[in-house]
Image (spheres, rainbow, N blue to C red):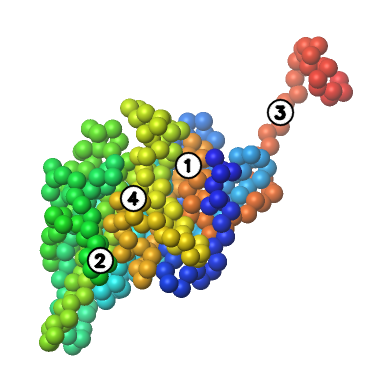
């Protein structure tokens, strides 16, 4: 399937399109986990520097394919570093009525949830970003004359259905656009929050709900998109009390693995291609935003991209963190994730970490056929 991917050949022009902003693409390689690699083959990907990595070429193991990104985060990169370099810089914009989005993309097991959610010892992008938004609001100068309020929604897109995670049991919700081209979801719970602990109080049980459901519903969490929305509304204290709304979407995407190849049980071959219509459309949207060519951006082709239309491209600030894993069992999914994420790639003719193993010469009795075909001069 590599031949058919025109994304693989793409070299995006630096600077991009003037009308729509580029999606910044960072790649994060998680540490090698030997329990993920029963054959103990070692990693097949390695970082080169802060923008480049290389992966073994599956067609020819003496070659590597080198990829270039906006940012590369190696396996030593901490949660704090990922946040500081890829997320923190875009947050001030949402206090000025602009929109922003951060996505974690990549195959199941590559570290999306670790990056977005993390653990209590190693909190990820979501808790850090929410804390930072509260800090930014607190630090705002009273004299500027604006009052700020913060609220949250939390939803999931599963099989092209929009589900409210703050109101479990709710039905598929519609996505609408108002006259100013703002995207909204009538009926979605929106909860005002005045502190980080208040955020946590609503967010943690909703996340747990999702995890519990996932084990029951056949790896649902790897096939649905979890979308946290933080909305900052500011109102001018003086007449005419102007109001501006900034939205921040923090998205833990469904696994990008090819479901046809991994053969999820219970899903017929024909249907599996449609499971992640949203993910496929997202890749087309990001591609057309970043290619700089004036093609139609296909936002309306899926729920995810329709929902994010006002917060992805245009005047919005967007970052995609592509998570990859170094073990060979992820090889093809890593390859396709990299082809999606890369600004450019290059085949390098040099051996990777594969060492040549000296084969001991044993006095083996060879068959007649071997002698004839071998021609090794014995
Ligand atoms: P995904 O959400 O993409 O399916 P996870 O975030 O659940 O992947 O990560 C899979 C496993 O790898 C988890 O056990 C997670 O704790 C671990 N992991 C992922 N990224 C890192 C990292 N950067 N450092 C340490 N462990 C990680
Ligand atoms: Mg996950």
Spot occupied by residue 294 in the image (x, y as percentages of width and height): 48, 65
Distance in Å between CA atoms under marks 1 and 3: 32 Å
Give the SS element for disc 3: loop
Q: Under 8 Å from ligand 1: the CB of mark 1? A: no
Spot occupied by residue 171 in the image (x, y as percentages of width and height): 16, 44
Q: Quadrant of residue 168?
A: top left
Q: Under 8 Å from ligand 2: the CB of mark 4? A: no
Give the SS element for disc 4: loop
Observer-nearest residue: 34 or 57?
57
Q: Which residue is mark 4?
A: 302
**Who comes first in sequence, dot 2 or dot 4?**
2
Binning the other alpha carbons within 10 Å of mark 3 as few (below 14), some (14 to 19) or many (20 upward) gives: few
Distance in Å between CA atoms under marks 2 and 4: 17 Å
Residue 10 drawn above or below residue 271: below
Binning the other alpha carbons within 10 Å of mark 2 as few (below 14), some (14 to 19) or many (20 upward) gives: few
**Who comes first in sequence, dot 4 or dot 3?**
4
Q: Which residue is mark 1?
A: 333
Which residue ends up furthest to the right in the rendered image?
377
What is the quadrant of the N terminus in the image? top right
**Who comes first in sequence, dot 2 or dot 1?**
2
Distance in Å between CA atoms under marks 4 and 3: 54 Å
Q: Which residue is mark 3?
A: 359
Decide if residue 2 is on the left or right side of residue 337: right
Q: Are dots 3 and 2 in contact, CB under 8 Å?
A: no
Distance in Å between CA atoms under marks 3 and 2: 66 Å
Spot occupied by residue 243 in the image (x, y as percentages of width and height): 18, 77
Q: Are dots 2 and 4 in contact, CB under 8 Å?
A: no
Binning the other alpha carbons within 10 Å of mark 4 as few (below 14), some (14 to 19) or many (20 upward) gives: some
Numbered mark located on residue 231 in the image: none
């Amino acid at each position: 399937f590599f031949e058919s991917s025109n994304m693989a050949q793409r070299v995006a022009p630096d600077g991009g399109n003037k009308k729509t902003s580029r999606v910044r693409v960072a790649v994060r390689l998680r540490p090698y986990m030997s329990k993920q690699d029963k054959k103990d083959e070692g990693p097949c990907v390695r970082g080169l520097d802060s923008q480049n990595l290389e992966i073994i070429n599956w067609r020819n193991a003496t070659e590597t394919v080198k990829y270039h990104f906006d940012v590369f985060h190696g396996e030593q990169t901490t949660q704090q570093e990922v946040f500081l370099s890829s997320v923190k810089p875009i947050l001030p914009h949402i206090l000025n009525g602009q929109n922003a989005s951060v996505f974690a993309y990549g195959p199941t097991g590559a570290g999306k949830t670790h990056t977005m959610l993390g653990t209590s010892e190693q909190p990820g992008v979501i808790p850090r970003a929410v804390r930072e938004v509260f800090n930014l609001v607190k630090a705002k100068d009273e004299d500027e004359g604006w009052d700020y309020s913060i609220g949250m929604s939390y939803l999931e897109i599963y099989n092209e259905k929009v589900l409210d995670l703050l109101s479990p049991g709710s039905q598929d919700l519609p996505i609408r656009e108002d006259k100013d081209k703002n995207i909204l979801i009538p009926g979605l719970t929106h909860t005002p929050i005045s502190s980080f602990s208040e955020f946590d109080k609503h967010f943690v049980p909703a996340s747990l709900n999702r995890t519990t459901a996932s084990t029951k519903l056949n790896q649902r969490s790897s096939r649905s998109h979890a979308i946290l929305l933080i909305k900052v509304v500011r109102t001018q204290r003086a007449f005419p009390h102007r109001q501006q709304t900034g939205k921040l979407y923090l998205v833990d995407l469904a696994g990008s693995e090819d479901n046809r190849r991994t053969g999820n049980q219970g899903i017929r071959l024909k249907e599996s291609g449609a499971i992640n219509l949203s993910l496929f459309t997202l890749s087309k949207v990001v591609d057309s935003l970043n290619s700089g060519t004036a093609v139609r951006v296909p936002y309306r082709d899926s729920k995810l991209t329709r929902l994010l239309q006002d917060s992805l491209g245009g005047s919005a600030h967007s970052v995609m963190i592509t998570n990859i894993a170094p073990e060979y069992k992820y090889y093809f999914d890593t390859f396709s994730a990299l082809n999606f994420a890369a600004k450019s790639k290059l085949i390098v003719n040099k051996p990777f970490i594969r060492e040549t193993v000296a084969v001991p010469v044993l006095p083996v009795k060879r068959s007649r056929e071997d002698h004839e075909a071998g021609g090794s001069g014995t």
